């Protein structure tokens, strides 16, 4: 598998930490110290599908292909305005594509899972170009009176086009059932036969300490595993492109691999945690900023609700 195009799109509305002080018992210093986040982008007038389609178009243009040349679409998404159909179907129509689509919900690990699926499809089916779109609107999942969670997230879409190639050196995905660490339930429509009590949750429920421990321990295991699978050491990796969730988690992982801070690109401060969109959007930022060199080895790692985790090593050759 080889990445041949990247794209991203973000809302125009910038929400700074100072703006959150107007309705939360918090401060810029409190947020930055604990998370590394200064501001985030939040959907206001846009629709998530508009961001997703824009990111997809950017990736296709970067890859030099048209919608007619897309053979399959994988969409990673946690929540959007449609219960059904899947967001991938909506994106397909907006792009004018005619290929099959599939949606996955692996939370913040969605991009790694999508790469794993794409690799399998490219190896076993007569496909040339697969479009991966990660479109997330976590701001709509938050209780905006809970300062422990709503300060963390932002909205975004990131996309890549992948094709056949040998750039993917190792990939690993895993799930460890720890639902209580991070989840959100929704109340469904009642029926005349429901006898169980159903309770609405006020946004995402998150046990911050559990998430931190799971994120660090799982990411370390995944990174160690893919390095072994690829026959490489931490020193062989040029850039560690990690899920942008929390600066403390990133720093903990950095200390484990014992690598210089310059190897860890970072945009969490400007965009917050954008769930599965964070890694493809960061890749797009790096690519368009001419910060990726042909032949460099990248290690991607993510974690999310479930608890899902994943990591991969790929050579950059776009």
Image (spheres, rainbow, N blue to C red):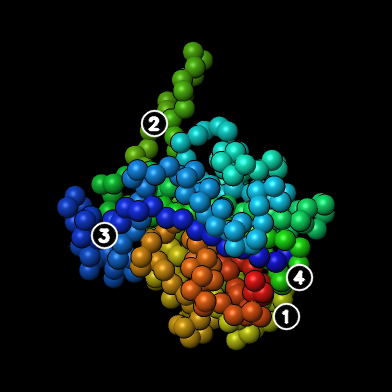
The residue depicted at 60 percent of the width and 75 percent of the height is 298
Disc number lying in front (4 or 1): 4
Residue 149 is situated, as x and y percent measured from the top left of the image, at: 34, 53
Residue 178 seen from this side: no
Of the pair 266 and 291, the residue shown nearer to us: 291
- Could you say which quadrant of the image residue 58 lies in? bottom right
Residue density around tag 2, few if under 14, some if 14–19, many if 20 or more, within 10 Å = few
Placement of the N terminus among the 4 image quadrants: bottom right
Task: Give the labeled residue for mark 1.
Answer: 231
The residue depicted at 33 percent of the width and 45 percent of the height is 44
Residue density around tag 3, few if under 14, some if 14–19, many if 20 or more, within 10 Å = some
Residue situated furthest top in the rendering: 192
Of the pair 305 and 78, the residue shown nearer to us: 78
Question: Does 278 sit above or below residue 294?
Answer: above
Number of the label disc, if any, that sits on residue 16: 3
User: Which of marks 1 and 4 precedes in the sequence?
Assistant: 4
Task: Give the labeled residue for mark 4.
Answer: 166
Disc number lying in front (1 or 3): 3
Verify CB contact (< 8 Å) between mark 4 and mark 3. Answer: no
Residue 126 is situated, as x and y percent measured from the top left of the image, at: 82, 52
User: Which of marks 4 and 2 precedes in the sequence?
Assistant: 4
Q: Secondary structure at mark 3?
A: strand
């Amino acid at each position: 598998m080889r990445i041949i195009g990247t794209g991203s799109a973000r809302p125009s509305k910038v929400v700074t930490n100072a703006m959150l002080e107007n309705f939360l018992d918090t401060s810029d210093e409190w947020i930055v110290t604990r998370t590394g986040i200064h501001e985030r982008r939040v959907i206001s007038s846009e629709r998530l599908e508009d961001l997703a389609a824009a990111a997809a178009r950017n990736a296709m243009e970067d890859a030099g292909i048209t919608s007619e040349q897309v053979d399959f679409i994988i969409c990673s998404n946690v929540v959007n305005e449609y219960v059904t159909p899947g967001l991938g179907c909506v994106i397909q129509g907006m792009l004018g594509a005619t290929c099959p689509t599939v949606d996955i919900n692996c939370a913040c690990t969605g991009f790694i899972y999508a790469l794993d699926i794409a690799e399998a499809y490219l190896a076993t089916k007569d496909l040339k170009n697969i479009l991966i779109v990660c479109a997330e609107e976590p701001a709509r999942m938050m209780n905006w009176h809970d300062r422990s969670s709503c300060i963390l997230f932002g909205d975004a879409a990131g996309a890549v086009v992948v094709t056949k190639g040998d750039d993917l050196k190792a990939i690993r995905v895993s799930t460890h059932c720890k639902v209580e660490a991070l989840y959100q339930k929704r109340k469904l429509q009642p029926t005349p036969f429901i006898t169980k009590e159903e309770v609405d949750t006020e946004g995402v429920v998150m046990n911050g300490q559990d998430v931190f421990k799971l994120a660090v321990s799982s990411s370390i295991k995944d990174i160690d595993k893919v390095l072994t699978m690829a026959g490489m050491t931490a020193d062989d990796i040029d850039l560690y492109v990690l899920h942008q969730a929390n600066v403390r988690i990133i720093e903990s992982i950095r200390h484990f691999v014992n690598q210089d801070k310059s190897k860890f690109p970072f945009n969490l401060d400007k965009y917050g945690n954008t769930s599965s969109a964070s890694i493809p959007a960061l890749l797009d930022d790096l690519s368009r900023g001419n910060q990726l060199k042909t032949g460099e080895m990248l290690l991607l790692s993510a974690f999310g609700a479930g608890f899902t985790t994943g990591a991969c090593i790929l050579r950059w050759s776009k």
